[in-house]
Amino acid sequence: MHEGETTTYGELFERVSVVADWLSHCPGFDRKRCPRIGLACESGVTYIVLALAILKAGGCLVPIAEELTETERRELIERTALSGLILGSPETWIPSVTLCMEPSTLAIWVALEGGNLENEAEFANLEPAFIRFSSGTTGSSKGVILSHTKLRERIVAANAALEICPRDRILWMLPMAHHFAVSIVLYLYHGACTVLGSSHLAEEVLDTAETTRATVIYGAPFHYALLAADRGGYSWPDLRLAVSTAAPLPVETARHFYQRFGKALVQGLGIIEIGLPLVNTGSAIDAPTAVGRPLPAFDIELRDDDGRALPAGCVGELWIKGPGMFDAYLSPWQPVTEICVDGWFATGDLAETDAAGRLHLRGRKKSVLNINGMKVFPEEIETIIERHAAVNRCRITGIHHSILGIVPVADVILEPGHSLTARELIHWCRDLVSIYKVPVQVRFVDQIPLTASGKIRRV
């Protein structure tokens, strides 16, 4: 359902079949080679049709996000050795190539030279469905390969918590280039109606929710902060599940959303290599910032640097074991059997469990600052500083100190129309965090480097 128009499952599958047939006859498309096909298209029904058509035609889908620069796009094309691109718009940034237009969707096929991967035979044997690149928050991103078999395992495992069914109408808010496999595909697999919102403005989102009687919303904390601030009278009585993902959920946002709609925000932990192993469905009111307990199909452990399991209350690296694990990294090539230890995957996330068994994320292992022997999580300080009314966003990094080794520094973007001095912010922090966590320097900046999915870049 999109902008007042409804596409039935029958119509969707018919459109997918037509486009898949067109694609299979495009120059340079060779199903026998399991071709890698890049998809550059804005979110919407057309994106869904084109993505499913690539899979149906026997291709491997490589999403190309709209916000990537030309340099980043070309690097992605080279690393994946694409056979071709499908553009959802006549506007193209690839010159001097063979073009072929699909009449029903006006999508454009761009034939590329492609070539072979270093491990082409091993890649094809996986029966790959997707190649997705991680956020690259701590360095060069890796191409995560997901097969058709693992994709199905993921959506079945995730739905044990989400319980999506044909009665549901999911209001979709996120970019499909970043969120598709364990969301849009899951909704289709379980026969639900997906409502594609065209606006992030709270009033318009709620109008859509009321018109369609949406039962589920899947969005980022940004969307929920806007909705919680709405002063209209619609209470959203049909809402049964609100899932927050893509970024840490601020406790204030969770509280204000609950006060406004009487429904708890449920935070989920999506991991590109695994899927959706944790969803806070059981404790969203009592512990809104937790990511909950593992879904029935998954096991978790927190381990120290020597790989030993840690008890509740101790911070350690999150290890996860379960279905739908990715098949390989693309470059450098590494099959999952060489990465996992006895089926366990080290996520790189630092977390701790509370007395009730709920998992709380504390930061990334590679981002931890060691200040005079004390471990400090930049994310914790950033969350505190962003509570200040004058602060829009903050990034904490470390600089070397002759005695303490590392000390924290804050890069801060101010809210429009607000003023704040470094001294004022440092004094404010001293009342909220331990003295060794207080930034020794505050730098006011116009922008903070982010990854393609909106996470802070730590390099």
Image (spheres, grey):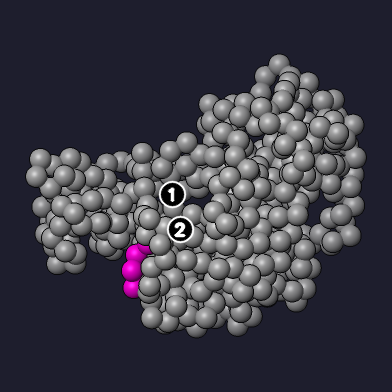
Horizontally, residue 29 falls left or right of residue 178, namely: right
Horizontally, residue 251 falls left or right of residue 90, namely: left
Residue 19 painted magenta = no
Please tell me whether residue 43 is drawn above or below residue 234 in the rendered image: above
Quick one: SS at disc 1?
loop
**Any mark on residue 247, and which?**
2
**Any mark on residue 455, and which?**
1
Assess disc 2: are there few (<14), some (14-19) or many (≥20) residues with their C-alpha within 10 Å of its C-alpha.
some
Horizontally, residue 262 falls left or right of residue 368, namely: right
Please tell me whether residue 29 is drawn above or below residue 349 in the rendered image: above
Residue at 78%, 49% (x, y): give it.
52
Magenta stretch in the rendered image: 313-317
Relative image position of residue 371 (x, y in whole percent):
19, 52
Of all residues shown, which one is farthest toward the top? 96
**Any mark on residue 371, and which?**
none
Horizontally, residue 164 falls left or right of residue 222, namely: right
- Whether residue 155 is visible to the viewer of this picture, yes or no, is yes
Relative image position of residue 9 (x, y in whole percent):
84, 61
The reply to whether discs 1 and 2 touch (Cβ–Cβ < 8 Å) is: yes
Earlier sequence position, callout 1 versus callout 2: 2
Quick one: SS at disc 2?
loop
Assess disc 1: are there few (<14), some (14-19) or many (≥20) residues with their C-alpha within 10 Å of its C-alpha.
some
Residue at 69%, 45% (x, y): give it.
130
Residue at 72%, 37% (x, y): give it.
123
Q: Quadrant of the C terminus?
A: top left
